Amino acid sequence: MKKPSIIALFILSSFLSFSQTKTYDDLLKDVVKQPELKNASIALYAENIKTGKTVFDYNSQVSLAPASVFKIIPTSIAIELLGSDYRFKTELAYSGTISPDGVLNGDIYIIGYGDPCLGSQNFAAHYNSGGELLQKWVAEIKKLGIKSINGDVISDISYFGEIPVPDTWIWEDIANYYGNPGSSLNYMDNLYYVHFKTGALDNSPTVITKTEPDDTGIKFDNKVKSSATTGDESFIYYTDNKSECEIRGTLPWKQSDFTIKGSIPEPEIYLARKFIKTLQAGGITVKGKESKTAEFDAGISRKVFYTTYSPELIKIAEVTNLKSFNLYAEMFAHHIEKKTGKPYSDAVKDFWKSKSVDVDGLYVEDGCGLSRFDGLTAAQMTAMLKYMRTKSVNGEKFFGTLPVAGTSGTLSRYCIGTKAQNRLYAKSGSMTRVRAYAGYILNANGDEIVFCFIANNYSCPNYRMRKIFEDLFINIANVTE
């Protein structure tokens, strides 16, 4: 029998490869037929930016909970309204007079203007350049000749006033690290860490070994049990007193040091207290105490003597999207309110209306997507992303804030070793029975596809829903139009 030629084999191989290449319609059918989505609400919308062709359009006008994909809204609008190079400030001031012997007969003020990341470890090189932040502040006070302070150290949060927890955040979330609504004076990301030693048996008790920092003033009622499960299933709950928290749930067993994170309820008070300790350690006595004011009395004369500036807004937006940082997204939302003079929901809708984006079905309860009352359509989010990519003067900078598959942020473990690696730029979002993605991906031709995919109330674990979407991304990257 005569053997087939190499050329014939190549042609046959190419034909089979081409014939097995799936179209966009095939990919859509593959997703919606998944049994785990039988009772789910799903929406998929995508466009080819180069050709303008609609790639997917499945329930694209249905409003669904987007989880952290919602962070695209405050990060993009803040970049547009405030500018990518905008810096937030924090001022130091004093009231009263300084005597010849170095006694301040008055108060020290820390005046907050809503820096999302003051003192954050995400920007340690920025804030601690030339010395630790609070020590630098002490040095500035010493430059004034102050050796003793007869008054208080007061945190002035009047820029935003008291920021309430959004009404639609659930109780299980708001004491945990991702549930902090922010302040005019945030400090160290308003975070604390609780360290546990877990037991050797399922359902055995756990022990809190330490908290960091150890001076938050929060007391814990530890009801956490050890579990054979591998994940963190513990939650911090406020009691009637926010300085007393209860921790419930489970942590993996046989752990000598397992850490969870909580949110400091009044970061402005903690900052003032920490500053007093740093002053005293630096040899400056403080006779007063830490306090705060949400409505500064304009009749009090005070002198600003030092200003700390944040990193550029675009760098904060990058951390917001790469790490899905709720606090920063919330602070952007408050600044958008301040800039526009409107409630955040109105400001968002008015902004996108002005960019010809249909806002019917857009429901805005917060900036970060933690609220289950947030809602948007896949078509809306795609239109927002298309505007940022094709019309905004800040388009490239915004694009650079998004996680990259297989490389950075929340997508660093996605699509590794596939054609979608380094070709998918997107914000992900997830919470119980919610999984969403929005961003840009290159197909096999190198055409850029802008998309938003959302699934709510699916009947499978989150990791399985992630796999369904990850397979979709890999297949899109292999589509030849």
Image (spheres, rainbow, N blue to C red):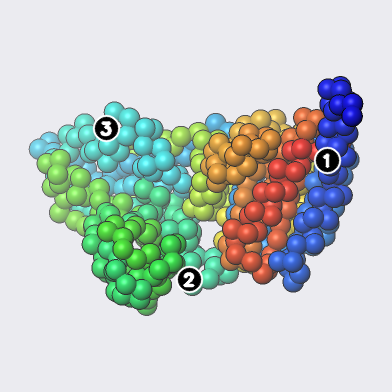
424 on left or right of 101: right
Whole-angstrom CA distance, mark 3 to mark 1, is 58 Å
The kind of secondary structure element at disc 2 is loop
- The quarter in which the N terminus is drawn is top right
Q: For the residue marked with disc 3, what is the amino acid? A: Gly
39 on left or right of 72: right
Q: For the residue marked with disc 2, what is the amino acid? A: Glu
- Residue most extreme to the left: 101
Location of residue 305 in the rendering, given as x and y in whole percent from the top left corner: 32, 35
**Residue 23 drawn above or below residue 260:** above
From the image, tell me which residue sits under label 3.
131
198 on left or right of 168: left
Location of residue 276 in the rendering, given as x and y in whole percent from the top left corner: 21, 50
Front-lying residue, 383 or 151: 383
From the image, tell me which residue sits under label 2.
172
- Of tags 1 and 2, which is closer to the observer? 1
Can residue 78 be seen?
Answer: no
Mark 3 or mark 1: whose residue is earlier in sequence: 1
From the image, tell me which residue sits under label 1.
21
> Do the CB atoms of the residues marked 3 and 1 lie less than 8 Å apart?
no
The kind of secondary structure element at disc 3 is loop
Location of residue 226 in the rendering, given as x and y in whole percent from the top left corner: 35, 70
> Do the CB atoms of the residues marked 3 and 2 lie less than 8 Å apart?
no
- Of tags 3 and 2, which is closer to the observer? 2
Front-lying residue, 26 or 77: 26
